[in-house]
Image: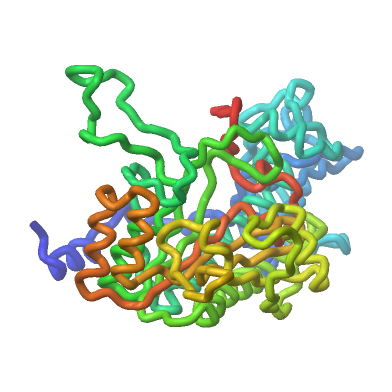
Amino acid sequence: MFGARCLLRALRSCSSAPCPRHKPTAKLSVRDALGAQNASGELVKVQGWIRSVRSQKEVLFLHVNDGSSLESLQVVADSSFDSRELAFGSSVEVQGQLVKSLSKRQNVELKAEKIEVVGNCDAKAFPFKYKERHPLEYLRQYPHLRCRTNVLGSILRVRSEATAAIHSFFKDSGFVHIHTPVITSNDCEGAGELFQVEPSSKIKVPEENFFNVPVFLTVSGQLHLEVMSGAFTQVFTFGPTFRAENSQSRRHLAEFYMVEAEISFLESLQDLMQVMEGLFKTTTMTVLSNCPEDVELCHKFIAPGQKIRTYAKKQLSNWGADLHTEHEKYLVKHCGDIPVFVINYPLALKPFYMRDNEDSPQHTVAAVDLLVPGVGELFGGSLREERYHFLEQQLARSGLTEAYQWYLDLRRFGSVPHGGFGMGFERYLQCILGIDNIKDVIPFPRFTHSCLL
């Protein structure tokens, strides 16, 4: 096997292509072309899809977009080009000179010398029509094509930017990224809404399990992160999770993405809330800074730097009853339609791993939710029960002692105070973009009775 130094030398010495004898045409993305500082007739090549075609007597105007920005690049061509093939939705490669535009609508334009139609598009059969605003419900019928629309393009660019911002936040804060398993034998939430995993063709005897135990698609990476926090102090994961909820509501998906973190040597909910608030604010400010046009297209967004308040739970129902969506919305509205922390939930409502506050007669656990306008619960977290005997009693009450011996071991061998949280990524996107239905902020939504593609 290569040593590290040998591998580096090999990488430095390899070349993917011979040096050209003449200067090639510079290939630019639409975003880079629009941002060019010196548009002085440089010969460039742009590839993308036609968003509009306008023909005059002697001039042909195209708008070409490659997904790198909301704004399209205007291409000006001689009317001698065959405009019949240059239809809305067709893919093209355009070569020409990047020059300053005479129009006030854009700084630069591409004066075409060569236009090649890479793939034709029958505009009449294409389900999306030029200049027509299609409802998001209509676009959901075409998951293989809806990403070509302006609105889905903006949402997915924001999604990409938010993903990068989340990773940057954790990296800058000293967290280690952990790939937690998708297949698991644990039911972290204890809700029973699980997808069981089995081989498509049973091996040997049908009654046997492939893994010797029943396994499921994960509903959370939390328990695996707790294992890793015992070695790396601060860890996070960001990946798909699954819930077999029989719901087609605007709030639910069968497959969605979760951002989860666990922190060792954490002794107060306030410390945990500071990390949650930091992640929320930093990610949102980065998105608003880097994707202003895309966010603006969605019409609604959170202003950066709003103070997230801590708010004591108001008794909206009988003590011991859970908060429902209408309660969450009431709290957010009551506090001025800004994000609100709710802390210290009744022990009976929460899973076995949350830390007992020992505050009879209320008997609460050190749990926290972050509620946001339009969505409700966005973050959920808690201090974890690090005390062996308390956890042992909770597992015994739940009948889980045998299955979670390994979890008790974490308390036997070098246990420390710790806590963590999870954030629903799609709900976060709904929050900052003002998107009403969660199915519109994920590329390929999966929900009951629907798994297109």
Regarding residue 87, the answer to whether it shows in the image is yes
- Residue 317, quarter of picture: bottom right
Residue 179: % across, % down: 34, 56
Q: Nearer the viewer, residue 143 or 411?
A: 411
Say which residue appears at 71% left-offset and 80% top-offset: 307
- Residue 288, quarter of picture: bottom right
Using the image, determine if residue 139 lies above or below residue 421.
above
Say which residue appears at 69% left-offset and 70% top-offset: 313
Residue 88: % across, % down: 76, 34
* Tally of marks: 0
Q: State the quadrant of the N terminus.
A: bottom left
Q: Nearer the viewer, residue 155 or 246?
A: 246
Q: Is residue 93 left or right of residue 412?
A: right
Q: State the quadrant of the C terminus.
A: top right
Colour mode? rainbow
Say which residue appears at 76% left-offset and 46% top-offset: 63
Q: Is residue 95 left or right of residue 400?
A: right
Residue 276: % across, % down: 55, 72
Q: Residue furthest front?
A: 361
Using the image, determine if residue 226 lies above or below residue 169.
above
- Residue 281, quarter of picture: bottom right
Using the image, determine if residue 125 lies above or below residue 166.
above
Q: Nearer the viewer, residue 17 or 179?
A: 179
Regarding residue 100, the answer to whether it shows in the image is no
